[in-house]
Amino acid sequence: MPSTYAHYCFGKAVYRRLPQEIQEEIKAYSPLYMTGLHGPDILFYYKPLKSNAINRIGYGMHGRPADEFFKKAWMRARELPEGRGGFAYLYGFICHFALDHSCHPYIEKKIKEIGVTHAEIEVEFDRMLLAKRGHNPLTHRLAGHIPTDMTSAGTIAEFFPEVTAEEVQQALKSMKHYNNLLVAPGHLKRGFIYALLAMTGNYKEMHGLIVNYKPNPKCADSNIRLSQLYHDAISLAVRLICEYRENGAADSEYQHTFGVE
């Protein structure tokens, strides 16, 4: 998956390309749309340092055909009262799928070529996007747009039958907490986090989530390619969103997974 900031920027770019009617629908439930941009990844943050039934749902969804989620979610959204914002959340979720589906095969190929972790490739791409937009990649906090209120959590939980609203809320709070924790411009905090990851057996896969002090030259070409894939995926997301309210997950694109197939 492209990382947190890439999904955030992608969702804003897609929004600008949508018809006004859909923009108005999203605007009314903006926090839900913005949370949907992170797809099943929000569940990664439920007690993230140890595998459990909740975060395994998030990881497992990436390997399954997307229509398994989007067909059931479409039916559930049609049952919910308009005031719940279900479709706004799912429009964001579609953005997540479009970007993941477009970028993951390349990322996995690149991992084998250069020996850099999945997380580091994605975070280096985030770094580039942040710098282009005038932000300091070492200090910018990435999860300020994530809501933690029970109303939002309740709507999101409607689409994950195995997860309660309370568990969704805990995952959202944890997402904000860990994203803020990983903002580590100082050597002392950074060293502490690396030590904690090592102690919990998560260093190899997760140390790349902390932005490097300097850009990794191994990722220079991947940033260029991911930029191309990112821009190509905008049209895909716009098309899928425009079709979704009436047709659900009928498009053949949904037969693909969020990740590598």
Image: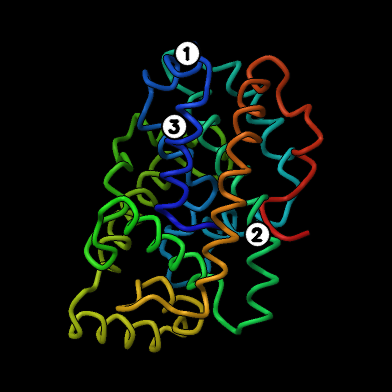
Image side of residue 25 versus residue 139, left or right: right
Question: Going 56% across and 71% down the picture, which residue do you hit?
Answer: 118
- Image: 191 above or below 90: below
Disc assigned to residue 20: 1
> Looking at the picture, how far across and down is residue 117, in whole percent?
55, 77
Q: Which is more toward the observer, 168 or 245? A: 245
Dot 2, crowdedness within 10 Å: few (<14), some or many (≥20)? many
Helix, strand or loop at disc 3?
Answer: helix
Three-letter code, disc 3: Tyr
Disc assigned to residue 183: none
Disc assigned to residue 33: 3
- Image: 34 above or below 242: below
Question: Going 36% across and 48% down the picture, which residue do you hit?
Answer: 172
Image side of residue 162 versus residue 28, left or right: right
Q: Which is more toward the observer, 17 or 87? A: 17
The part of the image, by quadrant, that contains residue 139 is bottom left
The mark closer to the camera, 1 or 3, is 1
Dot 1, crowdedness within 10 Å: few (<14), some or many (≥20)? few
Dot 3, crowdedness within 10 Å: few (<14), some or many (≥20)? many
Circle 2 residue: 104
